[in-house]
Image (spheres, helix red, strand yellow):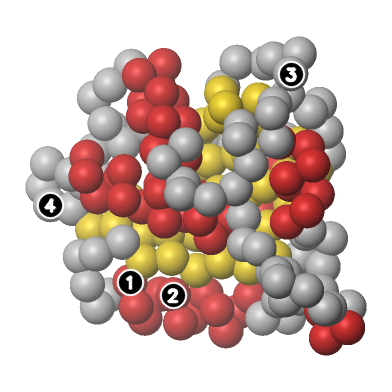
Amino acid sequence: MRQLPLLLAAGLLSACASGAPRTLSDQYHTYDYGDFFRVADGRDTHVIVRGNPFALNQGEFEQLVTSNMAAMPRGPKTTYTTAKSASAHPDYDVVWLFNGPQTIQPNELCNNPQAVSGQTGPASQLRVLAAFCRYDKANSWVEGWVDGGPQGVPRDGVTTLVQQMTRELFPTVNRNDPQRDNCKGPLC
């Protein structure tokens, strides 16, 4: 994406400025909020979580992530779940990576999420990458950071970050859609 280097630089500068959660997000031209609504409303949405910044077992941490995703105030009526479900659309996933490699790109994360390892255990700063994937490509992505201390990032910092990132992962308007200027309607 042509905007990625500028956005990453701005995100890195803001990451140094505050202990509050910070995010950077974008959509590929393929992202469509209506598509997300169509595949998720009344169905499960499959979520893959890699890494774990707490001393929780992985299942408990995955439940923390999915329950905070569900706290999103708008969007389709969906159940975010890490279990493969017959209700979930098989071509779509949401992938979360907690403290993974700095060089990973959203499409790499979607292509083979099981091959990407995130750090497990406390860290003084949490870096998270989330992608809304269709097949093996990202439709939208969000990168977020939150600072902690010697004991790691506090739980409320992580829950706030996951909620904020979920909202940004599913924007109602794709700012990179070449047809956006022709849009007429309430979501434009």
Q: From the viewer's perspective, is residue 132 above or below residue 135?
A: below
Q: Amino acid at mark 3?
A: Ser
Q: CA distance from mark 2 to mark 3?
A: 36 Å
State the residue at coordinates (41%, 47%).
Answer: 162
The residue where tag 4 is placed is 149
Q: Position of residue 108 (x, y in %)?
A: 71, 48
State the residue at coordinates (36%, 59%).
Answer: 145
Q: Secondary structure at mark 2?
A: helix
Dot label at residue 87: 3
Q: Secondary structure at mark 3?
A: loop
Dot label at residue 11: 2
Q: Position of residue 98 (x, y in %)?
A: 43, 42
Q: CA distance from mark 3 to mark 4?
A: 40 Å
Dot label at residue 53: none
Q: Nearer the viewer, residue 150 or 47?
A: 47
Q: Nearer the viewer, residue 148 or 159?
A: 159
The residue where tag 1 is placed is 15
Count residues near mark 3 (Cα–Cα under 10 Å), then give few for <14, some for 14-19, many for 20+.
some
Q: From the viewer's perspective, is residue 74 above or below residue 120?
A: below
Marks 3 and 1, the one that precedes in the sequence: 1
Q: Quadrant of the N terminus?
A: bottom right
Asked whether the beta carbons under mark 4 and mark 2 sit within 8 Å of each other, the answer is no
Q: CA distance from mark 1 to mark 4?
A: 15 Å
In the rendered structure, the answer to whether residue 128 lies left or right of residue 150 reads right
Marks 2 and 3, the one that precedes in the sequence: 2
